[in-house]
Image: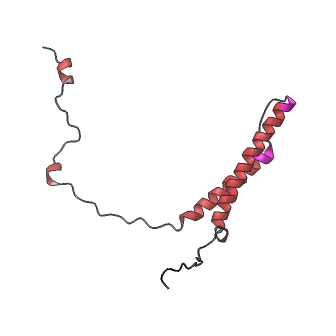
């Protein structure tokens, strides 16, 4: 029938079906969590009056795991490598074959340096 709307379900792949997408999203979430940990750690140090000397080791480990997940996920997005097809080299036009590598022109700057 003509004026009826029909709802169809698409069979598109979910984000959780592809492990690369899941790893990249998880990596970004880990990095965001590490940022929030550093901010809260620094605020706790300011409250207690201790100077900020460095980031705790578990936050560095979380940053490393998050960046590795993001990297592995991004590599999965790229797909398979394709061979580079070599293009045949074209010859230059006939009028450009005799052109020199360095060409000078007369311009207004030469008048300032010229001694009369």
Decide which of 57, 39 is in the foreground and name it.
39
Q: Quadrant of residue 27?
A: bottom right
* Magenta stretch in the rendered image: 47-59
Residue 28 screen position, x and y as percent: 67, 54
**Residue at left 67%, top 62%?**
23
Decide which of 92, 76 is in the foreground and name it.
76
Is residue 54 in the magenta section?
A: yes
- Regarding residue 80, the answer to whether it shows in the image is yes
Task: Tell me: residue 107, above or below residue 26.
Answer: above
Decide which of 9, 59 is in the foreground and name it.
9
Residue 73 screen position, x and y as percent: 63, 61
Q: Find the residue positioned furthest to the bottom.
A: 1
Our reading of the magenta stretch's main secondary structure is loop
- Regarding residue 55, the answer to whether it shows in the image is no
Residue 66 screen position, x and y as percent: 70, 54
106 vs 45, left or right, is left
**Residue at left 57%, top 64%?**
77
Residue 85 screen position, x and y as percent: 38, 66
Q: How is the image coloured?
A: secondary structure
Please state, as top left, top right, bottom left or bottom right, where the C terminus lies in the image: top left
75 vs 42, left or right, is left
Task: Tell me: residue 108, above or below residue 25.
Answer: above
**Residue at left 52%, top 68%?**
80
85 vs 49, left or right, is left
Task: Tell me: residue 67, above or below residue 110.
Answer: below
Q: Find the residue positioned furthest to the front.
A: 3
Q: Find the residue positioned furthest to the left.
A: 116
Is residue 3 in the magenta section?
A: no
**Residue at left 80%, top 39%?**
41
Number of numbered discs: 0
Q: Find the residue positioned furthest to the top.
A: 116
């Amino acid at each position: 029938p003509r004026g009826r709307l029909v709802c169809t379900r698409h069979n598109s792949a979910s984000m959780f079906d592809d492990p690369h997408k899941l790893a990249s999203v998880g990596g970004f979430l880990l990095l965001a969590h590490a940022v929030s940990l550093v901010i809260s750690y620094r605020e706790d140090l300011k409250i207690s009056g201790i100077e900020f000397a460095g980031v705790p080791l578990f936050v560095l480990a979380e940053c490393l795991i998050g960046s590795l997940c993001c990297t592995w996920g991004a590599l999965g997005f790229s797909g398979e490598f394709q061979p580079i097809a070599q293009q045949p080299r074209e010859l230059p036009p006939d009028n450009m074959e005799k052109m020199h590598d360095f060409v000078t022109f007369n311009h207004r700057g030469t008048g300032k340096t010229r001694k009369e």
